[in-house]
Amino acid sequence: MKFSVQLPTDRVDDLEAFGTAEAISENAAAAERAGFDACYVTEHPFPPDSWLASGGHHALDPFVSLSVAAAATSRLRLHTNILVLSYRNPFLAAKAIASVDAVSGGRVIVGVAAGYLVDEFEALGAPFEERNDRSDEALVAMKEAWRGDSVEMKGSGFDARGNTMRPTPIQRPHPPIWVGGNAPRAIRRAVEHGQGWSPFPLPAAGVGRTRSAAIESVEDLRRGIERMHTEARRQGREEPLDVNFVPFGLAMNRRRPLEVDALREQIAALESAGVTWLSVGMPTASREAYLDGLAEFSELFMDR
């Protein structure tokens, strides 16, 4: 099992602790020393007030945050968890990803998803109803750009008539792509376009809001992984896929203390179900709490 840990760049209410270059550097370096395999950041470029009022969050730009983390580390992978593809022109996204991969020496993991916040789509001028088709199209376009050869491709809102992108990513043919979402279309997208699937815990009550499928237990997740394998056989795919999951109770900005025995049992069950990566949240009451959380989690759950 490998571990990606939250860099709490969503805590824009406390930039001194979590959002300055000094803070991001110290937190990322501590995660690397603790033995984590990756750090992850979230994004919301322009979230709606109604969502913020009901518990939503802001975040620093993911590429800025990961570039700072890259400069402070040498081994830690740099994980977007997640990047909403259909908010962007795919070639601009490809350029940013290739740039971070280049400056980091090839450490990017591209976690992507279709997105669900209608008001954020509208504020950014991105057509919400086309988000799934645009996500599929973007993954094709990005891979074309990352080849470093001339691209001729017309799509939704773009028309490349012979354009070339350099530098190419250090990782060849491109950084691993992990597709987020619990719905069948997300699973299909992961198998067709990605190197991993990133489902997430979701109670049935949250299905309508996020437009995804519920995952309320390890057994729910196991069925999703079986569906992924079935889809891979249908597509004739032989390359294995990573499965990245947020353990139940370890979401961003964790507030509850660790229940050690229960979490050990859950991690073992998730690994048995086919999970290869866990994305875990840490306490963020203060930077000290965050750093202590890294050390505690490493000592208790990571064989380093």
Image (spheres, rainbow, N blue to C red):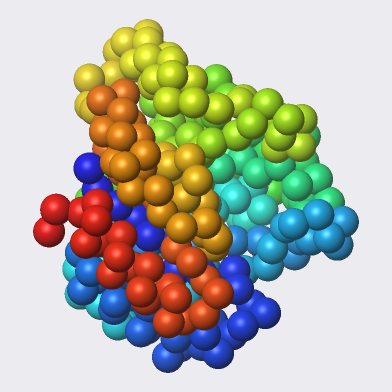
Question: Can the viewer see residue 75 in this picture?
Answer: yes
What residue lies at 29% left-to-right and 78% top-to-bottom?
A: 29
Identify the residue at the far right of this view.
50
Q: Residue furthest left?
A: 304
Res 167 visible: no
Residues 16 and 283: in front is 283
| Residue at position x 56%, y 42% in the image | 113
Residue at the image point whose x is 65% and y is 44% from the top: 115
Image quadrant holding the N terminus, namely top left
**Residue 301 on image: x %, y %:** 24, 52
Please state the horizontal and vertical placement of residue 46, each as a whole percent of the image: 75, 64
Q: Quadrant of residue 108?
A: bottom left
Q: Is residue 134 left or right of residue 301?
A: right
Q: Position of residue 151 (x, y in %)?
A: 44, 49
- Residue at image position (12%, 59%) is 304
Quadrant of residue 52 in the image? bottom right
Query: Is 220 drawn above or below residue 162 in the view shown?
Result: above
How many numbered marks does the figure carry? 0
For residue 54, above or below residue 242 = below
Residue 240 placed where, x, y %?
Answer: 24, 27
Q: Nearer the viewer, residue 24 or 299?
A: 299
- The residue lying toward the viewer, choosing from 7 and 168, is 7
